[in-house]
Image: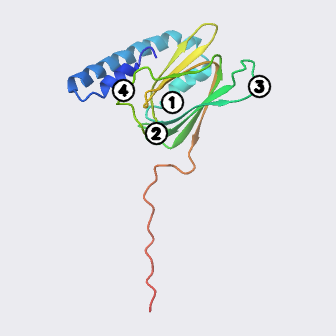
């Protein structure tokens, strides 16, 4: 990750209000710099990446990833990689209770690392925190995702597709309606 650094996330979780406030300002600046970077590479990005960037915000989605699909017929020989994100705790009402399926035709082996060990990383279900796209050489695109457990997943790819599907049985359910029982006469 070049902009939304894991170090910023760790500092943002500091119990010291000054440290957390400074980190929040630094995160805002990182967001501005990333937006400038995105504007400079957007026209060279595959249409599916631009569409994903414009339509999706997976921040705080539960992330189940990455996984490799084996297929010996792929030219890369590396297989395709998928990421699944479940959006049950999102601020975006139109994305609530959906499953996002991201499919990458990888160009290189994905990298998964925890570059900043810290006690602030979540031990529960990992969530999607921040992500960045970048343009590499020879038409290869990179997608880096900071996960709440400290992992940074970086996937260099040649092709990208995604689908969003509504959950059939949403995890966030309304209270069930209670039907009053009838008293049975004795």
Q: CA distance from mark 2 to mark 1?
A: 21 Å
Q: Do the numbered discs 4 and 1 sit on residues whose CB atoms are within 8 Å?
A: no
Under tag 1, what secondary structure?
loop
Q: Are marks 3 and 1 in contact (CB under 8 Å)?
A: no
**Image quarter of residue 32:** top left
Mark 3 to mark 1: distance in Å? 31 Å
Q: Is residue 9 left or right of residue 55?
A: left
Q: Is residue 115 left or right of residue 65?
A: left
The span from disc 4 to disc 1 (Cα, nearest Å) is: 29 Å
| First in residue order: circle 3 vs circle 4 | 3
What residue appears at the point 75 percent right and 22 percent down from the top-left corner?
A: 74
Q: Quadrant of the C terminus?
A: bottom left
Q: Secondary structure at mark 2?
A: loop
From the viewer's perspective, is 56 left or right of 75? Answer: left
- Where is 177 relative to 159, above or below? below
Of the two numbered discs 4 and 1 on the same chain, state the one appearing first in sequence.
1
Q: Earlier in the sequence, mark 4 or mark 2?
A: 4
Q: Label 4 vs label 2: CA separation?
A: 17 Å
Question: In the image as oriented, which residue stretches furthest toward the top?
Answer: 137
Query: Which residue position is annotated with label 2?
Result: 125
Residue 177 on image: x %, y %: 45, 64
Q: Which residue is mark 1?
A: 56
Percent from the top left, x then y, of residue 59? 44, 31
Q: Residue at x 35, y 30 (%)?
A: 119
Residue at mark 4: 118
User: What is the spatial separation of the Cα atoms under label 3 and label 4, in whole angstroms?
Assistant: 39 Å
Name the foreground residue: 79 vs 178: 79
> Mark 2, mark 1: which one is toward the viewer?
2
Name the front one of labels 4 and 2: 4
- Report which quarter residue 150 is drawn in: top left
């Amino acid at each position: 990750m070049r902009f939304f650094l894991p170090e910023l996330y760790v500092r943002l979780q500091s119990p010291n209000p000054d440290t957390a406030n400074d980190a929040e300002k630094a995160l805002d600046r990182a967001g501005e710099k990333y937006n400038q970077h995105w504007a400079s590479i957007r026209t060279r990005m595959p249409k599916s990446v631009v569409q994903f960037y414009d339509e999706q915000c997976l921040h705080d989605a539960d992330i189940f990833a990455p996984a490799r699909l084996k297929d010996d017929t792929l030219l890369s020989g590396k297989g395709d990689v998928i990421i699944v994100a479940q959006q049950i705790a999102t601020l975006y009402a139109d994305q609530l209770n959906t499953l996002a399926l991201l499919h990458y035709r990888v160009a290189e082996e994905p990298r998964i690392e925890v570059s900043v060990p810290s006690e602030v990383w979540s031990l529960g279900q990992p969530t999607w925190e921040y992500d960045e796209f970048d343009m590499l050489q020879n038409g290869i695109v990179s997608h880096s995702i900071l996960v709440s457990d400290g992992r940074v997943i970086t996937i260099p790819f040649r092709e990208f597709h995604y689908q969003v599907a509504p959950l059939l049985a949403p995890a966030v359910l309304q209270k069930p309606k209670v039907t009053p029982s009838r008293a049975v006469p004795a």
